[in-house]
Amino acid sequence: YAKGTGRGNYQFFAPEMNRAARERLELETSLRHALDRREFHLEFQPIVALDGDVVRSAEALLRWQPGGKAVAPDRFIPVAEETGLIVPIGEWVLKAACAQFKRWQAMGVPLGRVVVNLSARQFAHRNLVSVVRRALDEADCAPEQLGLEITESLLMANPLEAIRVLTVLSDMGIQISVDDFGTGYSSLSYLKRFPIHKIKIDRSFVRDLATDPEDAAIVTAIIAMAHSLDCSVVAEGVETEQQLAFLRERGCDEYQGYYFSRPLPADTLMARLLAPSGAG
Ligand code: C2E
Ligand code: MG
Ligand code: MG
Ligand code: MG
């Protein structure tokens, strides 16, 4: 049997160990060194207000390039979650995002907030609130300049604990969004119990908006019900003019997607936001 998931730098593979398991183990091993080797960086995707087409915030998205070759977040984030490595990695993301936000401010970039994804494992960690406070303090950012994204499943897993932690963060002034909404099992009425400010419609519902009447109905319902709960709505994964027109007509508040911009390196986003042509 293959061992080597421990702290040692060695591992050996039995020949019968299948390829997927071996790749998983290799990924995990190199992920353990990724912070020390400074293999992470952030990209930022603008979040655009439909009213006036202005960019007010940007979502930080983690990028990992071990040996110069990028590994997709959908591959390494789950491994980071399972191993608990997401806790120190997530702390790095918070600090790096706040520090970047401060640099943009110093350069006069007209952004109000930077938004960071939190994983369930980080959320369950006892010192999350102090980690967030420290990231803000070290970068000299105000809590109002930070947004946090959490998933529905996180809220469902331990609702009472989620309410407690989110109340602290929200009372500090941090904006809370529910990410990938519609993919979990919660109902909007259930969400009423949580101190949340925004709902992000998962991009799987946005994709076929123009052609699939069911998706169109779901998106319409999410927008209307979110508004009735005093939450604002962000549509994820907007790639076409038609999708945007639909969302605009239904009163969606903000959108994110390749139609406006892919996630960008910090300097590229800054150049774009400072360009004389404005946010567009
Ligand atoms: P997410 O938070 O829902 O982020 C949105 C994802 O959709 C990003 O993928 C983004 O690049 C992608 N996207 C944006 N616009 C479009 C579009 O128009 N079309 C399509 N097809 N995709 C679009 P990415 O960067 O690969 O990240 C995937 C997921 O990994 C994120 O989903 C988030 O759940 C997780 N993730 C990324 N960074 C972090 C992090 O720092 N911490 C944690 N815990 N999770 C992270
Ligand atoms: Mg997100
Ligand atoms: Mg999402
Ligand atoms: Mg997602």
Image (spheres, grey):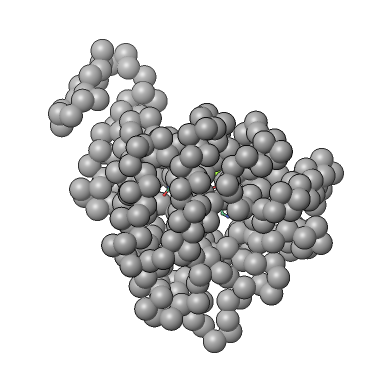
92 shown above or below 21: below
224 shown above or below 183: below
What residue is rendered at 37% in x and 44% in y? Answer: 128
What residue is rendered at 33% in x and 31% in y? Answer: 83
Coordinates of residue 11 in the picture (x, y in percent): 19, 25
Coordinates of residue 178 in the picture (x, y in percent): 58, 46
Pick whichever, 165 or 242, lies toward us: 165
Relative to 213, 191 lies left or right: left
245 shown above or below 83: below
Pick whichever, 166 or 61, lies toward us: 166
**Image mark count:** 0
List the single residue furthest toward the bottom: 276
Coordinates of residue 144 in the picture (x, y in percent): 48, 63
Residue 182 in sight? no
Which quadrant is the N terminus positioned in? top left
What residue is rendered at 37% in x and 52% in y? Answer: 132
What residue is rendered at 29% in x and 43% in y? Answer: 88
Coordinates of residue 253 in the picture (x, y in percent): 69, 61
Relative to 3, 86 lies left or right: right
Which quadrant is the C terminus positioned in? bottom right
Choose top left, top right, bottom left or bottom right for residue 19.
top left
